[in-house]
Amino acid sequence: MTEQIVVGYDGSPSARRAVQFAQDAALAREVGLIVAHVLEWSPYTFLSPQELEERHMRREEELKRADHAILRPLIMELESRGGGDITTVSRFGNIAEMLARIASETKASQIVIGRTGHSSLASRLFGSVAGALAQAAPVPVTIVP
Amino acid sequence: MHKTTTMAAAVALLAQPAMAQTLDDQINSIFAASTGWFVSLIFSSFPGTNFPWIVGWLVVAALVFTIYFAFIQFRAFGHAIALVKGDYSDPNDAGEVSHFQALATALSGTVGLGNIAGVAVAVGIGGPGATFWMILAGLLGMATKFTECTLGVKYRNEYPNGKVSGGPMYYLKKGFAERGVPGGGFLAVMFSIFCILGALGGGNMFQANQAHAQIAGVVGDYPGWITGVVFATIVFLVIVGGIKSIARVTEKVVPLMGVLYVGAALLIILINFDQVGAAFGMIFAGAFTGLGVAGGFVGALIQGFRRAAFSNEAGVGSAAIAHSAVRTNEPITEGFVSLLEPFIDTVVVCTMTALVITITGQLMIDPATGLFILDEAGTGIMTMGGNTGVALTSAAFASAFDGFQYVLVVAVVLFAFSTMISWSYYGLKAWTYLFGEGQTKEIVFKVIFCIFTVIGAAAGLGPVIDFSDAAIFAMAVVNIIGLYVLMPVVKRELRSYQKRLSTGEIRKFV
C-alpha cells in the first residue's frame, strides 16, 4: 500500500463521523485507512508509589480495554459499510502530537479528525486537538464537523 | 551519650512525676524508655570523642562513592536533567512510568519535614555553620544515591502481572548471590526489619509529631493524640481503604506547596539581600569555629550531616525502593536521575530554610562577643520566642510575611501526609519481603502503621526524633555494606553505558 489516511478515534459521535468520512475517502481513492486511538498521557504527572508499581500492569490493561471496547466494535461497523484496507493502532501520549507522529511514521498523506465541539472558552483555556494538530501536522488535516 | 538523647531523657524525667496522668505523657515516657537503648546504640560515639560513628559511616561512604565513580554527581548532572526531560525516552514506551515520575514520587517522600523542621533543629543546635556541612553532605550524598538507585533497578523483581518490587532487600539478596558473597539473605532481612522501624519512626511518627506541633502552634495547645487519631484515620482510608482521591489531591498539591515554599524563601532572601553576605559569613565561620554553639564546630558538623542524611535519605535505601518501578532497559539511567534528589532536597530546599532562619535573625547573638547565646539547658541556641523545630522555621517565615505561618501549617500537614504515604509503602515492601505477600499480612502492617501515627503525635519531639533518626540510620548501616560489595557492578554498568553513549548507540529521541 503506497498511500494511507490516518483518522483519530476516541469513541465519541464526532469521531465516528470522522472515521466514516475517512473510510469513504479511502475507499473512493483506494488507499489504506489507519484508525488511531490515543490514550491521553503525560510523563510529567505525579503518581503515588503504589501507582508507580502498578503502572506497567495498568498500561497493558488500558491498551487491552481500548482494543476491546473501542477499536473492535468500530472495525465491525466499518466492515459492514464497505470495509477496505483498515489497520488500528493504540498509543499513549498527547493526542495531537501522537496523531502527527503516527502520520509521519506511516508516511500517511492525510489526517482526519472529528471536532470536539468544545465551547470557545474551553478551547481558549486548554487548546483544542484540532488547533494543536493544525500547527504540528506534517500532512494536510481534515476536520469533520 | 548524644546530646539530644540526654535532653530527651531529661524531658521524659521531668514530665513523669509532674503530670503522669495525661495520656500524652504516658505515651511519651513509655516510648522514651523502650527505645532508649536502640537510640544510644546507633548514636554511640567513637571512643574518646563525641562524634557519632553512624555519621562518620555515612560521610565516609558518600566520599568513597564520590571518588570511586570519579565525581559522577558533577559529571552526570547535565545528562540527568536530559533524562528527566525525556530526551532519551522512547515514545513507544509512553504510558509507562517516566524518569520524571519516578523522581517526583521519590522526592515527595523525601522533601518534607526534614527540610522544614529538620533543618531548624540542625540550625537551632549547631548554628548556621551546620548549613555548610549539610550542603557538603548533600553534594556527597548524590553519589551514594546514584549507586543505590542503579542497584535498585538492576536487581528488582518483575512479576508476570507486570508489577515490580525493588529495593535494597532485593539487591542485597540477588546481588550478593551473583557475586558469590555470603550473607546477602541475612542482610536483606536485617534491612527489612530496620526499614519497617524507619517507616514507623521517621516516615510516620516524626511526621505526625511535627504536624501536630504546627497545628497546635496556630490553634493553641491541645492533646497530641487527637491530631494522631485524625491523621491515622485519613492515612487508614488511603492505604487500607484505597481511597485514591485523597492521595491524588495530595500528589497534586504537594509539588505546588514545594514551589510556594521555595518561592517564599527566595523572596525573603531577596528582600534581605544586603544580609545574604553576612549570613554566608556566619555559615562559613560557624562551620569551622561553631561560633559558640554546644560542641563547637564538631557540634555544627554533626548536626549538619545528621539532618542532611535524614532529609535526603542518601544511603538509607528508601529511594531505591521508589525508583525501581521506572521503565528502562538501562538501570544506570535511574541512578543518574536519582542523583538530582539530594541536590534538590538538600542543596536547594534545605539551604533555603537555613538561610531564612539565619537572615531573619531568629538565633540570638551576644553583640559583645559575636557568639550565639545558648539556652538554659546549654544544648541549643536561644531563639526569639524560644522556638525549636518547625516552630522556629514558622517564626522565621512569619517575621517576613505576616500570616505565612498559616500557609506553612498547610504545607507541613501536606508534606507530612505525603511522606507518610510514601513510607507506608516502603515499610510495606519490607514487610512483604519478610512475611510474603497477602491481603491479611498487608493489612496487619497498615494497621500497625496507623497506631504509630497516634503514638508519634502524642509523644514529645525529643524521643520521637531520636528514635526516627536511629531507625533510619540503622537501615543505612546494612544498605551501605551492600553498596560497598556491589559497587563494581554499578561501575561496569556505568562504563558500558558511557561507551554506548559515546558511540551513538544510545541516542536522543528528540
Image (spheres, coloured by chain):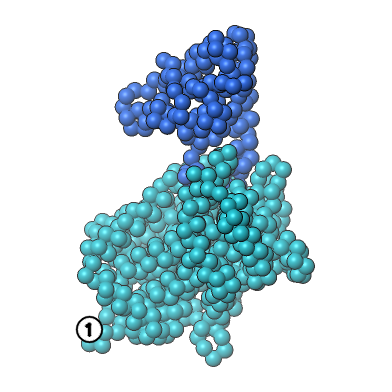
Chain colours: A blue, B cyan
What's the residue at 23%, 66% (across, down)?
Answer: B272
Which is more toward the observer, B403 or A35? Answer: A35
What's the residue at 32%, 56% (across, down)?
Answer: B263
What's the residue at 37%, 23% (across, down)?
Answer: A118
Q: Is residue B44 above or below residue B173?
A: below
Position of residue B288 in the picture relative to residue B419 (left or right)? left
Kind of residue at disc 1: Pro
Q: Quarter holding the N terminus of chain A?
A: top right
Q: Position of residue A111 (x, y in %)?
A: 48, 23
Residue B20 visible in the current orientation: no
Residue at the limit of the structure toward the bottom, as seen here: B48
Q: Position of residue B29 (x, y in %)?
A: 51, 71
Quarter of image, res B41: bottom right
Which is more toward the observer, A53 or B295? Answer: A53
Q: Quarter holding the C terminus of chain A?
A: top left
Q: Chain of mark 1?
A: B
What's the residue at 63%, 66% (across, down)?
Answer: B491
- Residue to which mark 1 is pinned: B367
Q: Is residue B205 above or below residue A119?
A: below
Quarter of image, res B479: bottom right
Position of residue B295 in the picture relative to residue B27 (left or right)? left
Residue B249 visible in the current orientation: yes
Q: Position of residue A80 (x, y in %)?
A: 62, 9
Q: Position of residue B14 (x, y in %)?
A: 44, 77
Position of residue B149 in the picture relative to residue B309 (left or right)? right
Count neighbours of disc 1 (C-alpha within 10 A) and say few if under 14, some if 14 to 19, many if 20 or more. Answer: few
